[in-house]
Amino acid sequence: MPIHNTDIADIFNKLANLLEIKEANQFRVRAYRNAASTISSLSKSAADMIEDSEDLTQLPGIGEDLAGKIEEIVKTGSLAQLTEIEKDVPANLDELMDIPGLGAKRARKLYEELGITSLDELKKAAESGKISEIEGFGQKTEENILEELKHGGEGEKRIQISVAEEYVIPLIDYLQDMDGVNQVEVAGSYRRRKETVGDLDILVTGDTHNRIIEYFIEYDEVDEVASKGETRSSIVLNSGIQVDLRAVSQGSYGAALLYFTGSKSHNVKLRNMAIDRDLKINEYGVFKDKERIVGKTEKEIYEILDLSYIDPELRENRDEVEASQKGELPDLVTLEDIRGDLQCHTKASDGHASLREMVEAAKEKGYEYLAITDHSPLVAVANGLDADGLAEQIDKIDELNSKINDFLILKSIEVDILEDGSLDLGDDILERLDLTICSIHSKFNLTEEKQTERIIKAMDNPNFNILAHPTGRRIGKRRPYEVNMERLMEAALERGCFLEVNAHPERLDLNDVYCKLAKEIGLKIPISTDAHRKDELENIKFGVWQARRGWLEKDDVLNTRNWGDLKNLLKRS
Ligand code: DGT
Ligand code: CA
Ligand code: CA
Ligand code: ZN
């Protein structure tokens, strides 16, 4: 059974967590976390690298020992060392560490004092008031735990789009390899580029439908065949991801694609429009009386309803049908429009590549500029730069800029916004930068009023250019802090500041709805990766997808411009 990079990263992360709970050497813990992060951001599969006899020790932070462990995981699907540790520490105890405010130490204490070994047990203990009785925990912690569990445990588990992509691409390749298969397309929320997907929906055309189904269920990553018919089947992959497949005929391909792309409410809207025209629309086509009049392509179906083609990212019933009727659909920004990246980290703080390596990678991507935005001192765990450290980096960048052609390294910083709205570095040093990115990494729990005031106060500083990851959420892990987004955007517009779309697949912050709000307010948006390694510059596509879902066009996105034009826009009024 093939092992994906995510599987390897999960094992290393689990190992790091359990070791931390066991109070193992911090250096070892960090080494496993770094390895997990290296593996999950690789652009190729570690299993393939091993099969091609590539040397894993060439990867940053991977020595002989870790390379051996990766091989063990790829070959056996597990790691003996982890199994060993799970004899001492309950395997799911580290889930507790995902609750903000509970680290390894507290997870350990909860286990020792109350025998808690999982989130379920944590919830029960909190509900019965046992947690506040433990020394060092208190009433407030207990309430906080209950509040977090309420938000975290909601609904079914959804998969980040980047993870879904990792599993769907090899499956598409597999399906395309079959003789007699024509088109293979992923529909559903994945095609709409939603930040998380519930399951994957695949459409296949080809001559013999039942043969396609037989071939599908023989995919070597199938854990369970949930259902199997003549033209459709559902499987669950070893990763737990469910995949629905439908074999459809060429004549109804467009209708099926439209139907299974959704969203459901977009479909309902189209169906009602069809009824108004005495037509019937379903996954086989558009019918007048009993006769199918169209069905081959999505475009011809939209045309029958007097609509122009609507991009999948827009199909959420958020006025896209009305815009299509009026000929006012946005011409969505594309990946090719992006000319540079405005947030990344280097080894100077918590990044894993040097300044030069990041610059070369950005140049290789065809970019014209890259802003280097290491952290400021407040983020001590990230080894943030103080004014002297930043001054040194400025000199290094000047020197490197003088040596490279057709590319500009922008001098910048990701400076923390302190609780009182002041910035973590002085104006003297910030004035020397090309742009300043500001963000919140502390005091997430302020009231909406206070959090909004805090950020607007920071924007009053004339050095403030871009608010990074504006709500601080981490998908499936940390909910957004409370802010009044409309007020923030209005304040940014008045002052000539901007709010970013952070393209990291776990953040995608601003989200689609906020992107659309920004557009309505007239605020332009930068899309930045926040890359901490070279490969993470590729995350830009997730940010572009989110921006597309938020109706953004090329002109709405800041970094589709050359530096000269961008610089003018960044000038504070
Ligand atoms: P997900 O999987 O939760 O991320 O979201 P979707 O949008 O992929 O939803 P899913 O997998 O349940 O169904 C795929 C598409 O099939 C959905 O977007 C629209 C279509 N569909 C499913 N059920 C219905 C339905 O009852 N009525 C209509 N009109 N369309 C449906
Ligand atoms: Ca789906
Ligand atoms: Ca489905
Ligand atoms: Zn960082």
Image (cartoon, helix red, strand yellow):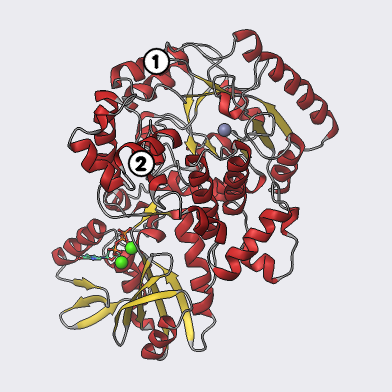
Residue position for label 1: 454
Crowdedness of circle 2 by 10 Å Cα count: few (<14), some, many (20+)? some
123 sits to left or right of 347 = left
Q: Secondary structure at mark 1?
A: helix
Confirm whether residue 44 shows in the render: no
Relative depth, front residue between 167 and 124: 124
Query: Which mark identifies residue 111?
Result: 2
Q: Is residue 295 above or below residue 45?
A: below
Q: Is residue 105 above or below residue 12?
A: above
Q: Are marks 2 and 1 in contact (CB under 8 Å)?
A: no
Q: Cβ of disc 1 within 8 Å of ligand 4?
A: no
Amino acid, disc 2: Tyr
Of badges 2 and 1, the one in the foreground is 2
Image quadrant of ligand 4? top right
Crowdedness of circle 1 by 10 Å Cα count: few (<14), some, many (20+)? many
Amino acid, disc 1: Arg
Q: Secondary structure at mark 2?
A: helix
Relative depth, front residue between 236 and 33: 33
332 sits to left or right of 383 = left
Which residue appears at 27% of the width and 40% of the height? Answer: 149
> Picture coordinates of residue 358 (x, y %)?
70, 40
Relative depth, front residue between 243 and 411: 243
Among all residues in the image, which is located at the extreme right? 403
